[in-house]
Image (spheres, rainbow, N blue to C red):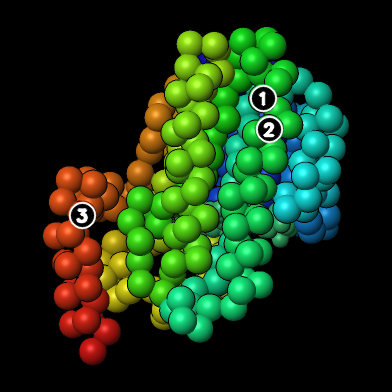
């Protein structure tokens, strides 16, 4: 069955592990050619080999998304880009009063500015052609602020603000901007981000597999839909948060207090 992605070129940042790796494999299964970016060459090569085994063309570009020049180089090497997936990111959780300035800065440079630099590098060619899709992997932490996750939440709120703005700016010019906002995903993300520091109530939303998020990213590339929140439990809670923010925060605080006691 045609996927609409055959022979398209998809650039994925943060493709060396977790969600980015799973997305690369999912795109490859649907016939897209890939350009994979991250800092760890060996892991990128492993993912690329697995993608090529599925019959598609796959290139790797060692990229540190905090460097504007690396992001420009990535897009230059990729050439014609049909889909850009801004996925590179990490988190360090800490209460604001003890959060390290370097951590706050590094998260913003990677999660937010990394996406901005890649989007800025690819946008001119997409606008000139009148086609292309940018998929930003944000988080439910960009829709609701969670205690002890402020530095990370700020980066994802920034990403969502930027995505919404860009979407409105390019609407009707053939370029689509879509967001995928996962809850907790079982990846290496939690090597750096300490799960125990998340509010207790966040444990009530079950963790999902990176393959589930990868599927949402692929669908976003296909239909350009404004926003996908997953899993369903997270989507429902975000609806509550957006309709009744104070109630959602009160519930989060109270339920967390009970769960964290035990
Ligand atoms: N796991 C979750 O619960 C969860 C929930 C919501 C949203 N997210 C978001 O999903 C995205 C992917 O995370 P994940 O869960 O798949 O975590 P992961 O397995 O740790 O993957 C993170 C990826 O980002 C790359 N990366 C980090 N810093 C980078 C930099 N400066 N330049 C280039 N690449 C960089 C890493 O590659 P290198 O180290 O090789 O550079 C790696 O490929 C992140 O944006 C994260 O915020 C995750």
| Residue 188 visible in this rendered orientation of the protein | no
Is label 1 in contact with label 2 (beta carbons under 8 Å)? yes
In the depicted structure, whether residue 74 falls above or below residue 194? above
The quadrant where residue 58 appears: top right
Secondary structure of the residue carrying tag 3 is: helix
Residue nearest the viewer, comparing 15 with 87: 87
Q: Which residue is mark 1?
A: 123
The quadrant where residue 208 appears: bottom left
Instruction: State the CA–CA distance, disc 3 to disc 2.
Output: 33 Å
Left/right of residue 228 with respect to residue 169 in the rendered view = left
Badge 1: residue crowd in 10 Å (few <14, some 14–19, many ≥20): many
In the depicted structure, whether residue 259 falls above or below residue 193? below
Badge 3: residue crowd in 10 Å (few <14, some 14–19, many ≥20): some
Point 15% across, 51% down: residue:
244
The x, y position of residue 145, in whole percent, is 35, 61
Badge 2: residue crowd in 10 Å (few <14, some 14–19, many ≥20): some
Tell me the quadrant of ligand 1.
bottom right
Point 29% across, 53% down: residue:
234
Which numbered disc covers residue 120? 2
Point 23% across, 89% down: residue:
261
Q: Which residue is mark 3?
A: 245
Left/right of residue 209 with respect to residue 58 in the rendered view = left
Is label 1 in contact with label 3 (beta carbons under 8 Å)? no
Left/right of residue 9 with respect to residue 167 in the rendered view = right
Instruction: State the CA–CA distance, disc 1 to disc 2.
Output: 5 Å
Number of labelled discs?
3
């Amino acid at each position: 069955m045609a996927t609409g992605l055959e022979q398209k070129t998809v650039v994925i940042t943060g493709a060396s592990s977790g969600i980015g790796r799973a997305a690369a494999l999912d795109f490859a299964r649907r016939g897209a050619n890939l350009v994979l970016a991250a800092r760890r060459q060996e892991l990128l090569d492993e993912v690329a080999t697995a993608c090529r085994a599925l019959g598609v063309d796959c290139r790797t570009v060692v990229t540190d998304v905090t460097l504007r020049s690396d992001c420009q180089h990535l897009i230059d090497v990729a050439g014609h880009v049909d889909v850009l997936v801004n996925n590179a990111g990490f988190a360090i959780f800490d209460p604001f009063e003890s959060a390290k300035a370097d951590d706050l800065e590094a998260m913003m440079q990677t999660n937010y500015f990394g996406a901005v630099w890649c989007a800025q590098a690819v946008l001119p060619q997409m606008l000139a052609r009148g086609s292309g899709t940018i998929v930003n992997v944000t988080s439910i932490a960009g829709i609701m602020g969670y205690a002890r996750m402020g530095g990370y939440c700020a980066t994802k709120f920034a990403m969502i603000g930027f995505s919404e703005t860009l979407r409105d700016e390019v609407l009707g010019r053939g370029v689509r901007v879509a967001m995928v906002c996962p809850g907790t995903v079982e990846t290496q993300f939690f090597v750096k981000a300490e799960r125990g520091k998340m509010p207790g109530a966040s444990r009530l939303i079950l963790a999902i597999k990176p393959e589930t998020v990868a599927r949402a990213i692929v669908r976003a590339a296909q239909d350009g839909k404004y926003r996908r929140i997953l899993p369903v439990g997270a989507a429902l809670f975000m609806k509550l948060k957006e309709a009744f923010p104070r109630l959602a925060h009160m519930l989060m605080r109270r339920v967390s207090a009970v769960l964290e006691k035990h």
